[in-house]
Image (cartoon, rainbow, N blue to C red):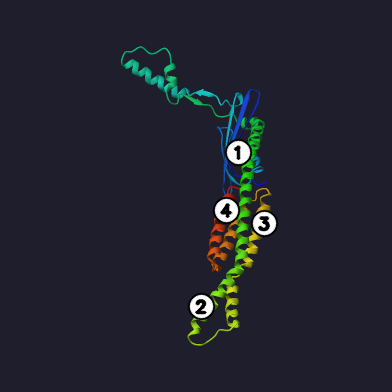
Amino acid sequence: MALSMTGCGEGSAGAGGNTCRVEIRGVNGKQFKLTVRAREGLSGLEGRIESAVRQRIRRGTVQLTLDISGPAAATGRRLDRGQLGGYLDDLEAFCSARNLPLPQSADALLGLPGTVVDAPPDPGLAENAWPLVSQALEAALDRYDQMRRAEGANLAADMRVTCGEIMSLADEIRSRVPLVVTAYRDRLFERVTKLLADRGTTLGEADIAREVVLVADRTDIAEEIVRLASHIDQFGRLLDEDSPGRSLDFLAQELGREANTIASKSLDVQIAHAVVEVKTRIERLREQAQNIE
């Protein structure tokens, strides 16, 4: 089944008082691109995360947010003794110069910049957290796939309807071609007969037939109609496959080329109008295909 590249999913897992939450958001893109947002200390998991995501997602721009709370996520805080000592020395000098009593508590200094800093992250945090992260990641990917499958099914259904409309228009064009040639022959015979009537000259059926054959050959679109039908048939089969987005986009371009060729060969207003409708629907297919993985 065709999958949409647009979707979101969230998964969580807990163990030992720790909780991991993973959120995935994806939009359409020509290539696969993953961005991971996680707290310091978990950057070592990005390789594993990307490997797991690539097994489920082939195309699209994906943003993944990872957060862990609980004892495993505690990075700790430490007191910068040098910075605090500098503040105290400045305070002592200030109080001494003005004959002020020195405060007996340093609580007010703890809120000053640089006094309390984050401790370096635990080197083993990423490795210890991976089982929990992996569980939450798989849950998020499952929900992400559910949304993508649902949207992909809707896109595929809409594209099948559009393909049917294109084929109906192609049949209309095909049935119109012989009538166009006949109408051209009748108009040509009538106009030439009028032009030659004053000169007492008549035009033979063979002369008209040769001209009509030439026009019929220049305006023959049988091959284009066959290729158009073949592309539409293949388009429908691809919608049943996994990750057909690139092939669908290519076929949409080929459909556009066939429609342009038919338009350039057409001498009939009704066929020209039908081709415009065909090209409108092909453009819709192309836009929808760009959302398919």
Query: In the image, which disc is placed on residue 8?
Result: none
Query: In the image, which disc is placed on residue 46?
Result: 1
Q: Amino acid at mark 1?
A: Glu
Whether pointer 3 and pointer 2 mark residues with C-beta atoms closer than 8 Å, the reply is no
Q: What is the spatial separation of the Cα atoms under label 4 and label 3, in whole angstroms?
A: 15 Å
Q: Earlier in the sequence, mark 3 or mark 2?
A: 2
Q: Earlier in the sequence, mark 3 or mark 1?
A: 1
Frontmost residue, 236 versus 174: 174
**Residue 38 at what x, y percent from top left?**
56, 34
Q: Amino acid at mark 3?
A: Asp
For label 2, the SS is helix
Q: What is the spatial separation of the Cα atoms under label 2 and label 4, in whole angstroms?
A: 44 Å
Whether pointer 4 and pointer 3 mark residues with C-beta atoms closer than 8 Å, the reply is no
Q: Which of the 4 image quadrants contains residue 92?
A: top left
Query: In the image, which disc is placed on residue 286?
Result: 4
Q: Amino acid at mark 4?
A: Arg
Q: Which residue is mark 2?
A: 191
Q: What is the spatial separation of the Cα atoms under label 3 and label 2, in whole angstroms?
A: 43 Å
> Mark 3 or mark 2: which is in front?
2
What residue is at 41 percent from the left and 19 percent from the top?
88
Q: Which residue is mark 3?
A: 233
Question: In the orientation shown, which residue stands out farthest toward the bottom?
Answer: 200
Q: Is residue 182 above or below residue 206?
A: above
Q: Amino acid at mark 2?
A: Arg
Whether pointer 2 and pointer 4 mark residues with C-beta atoms closer than 8 Å, the reply is no
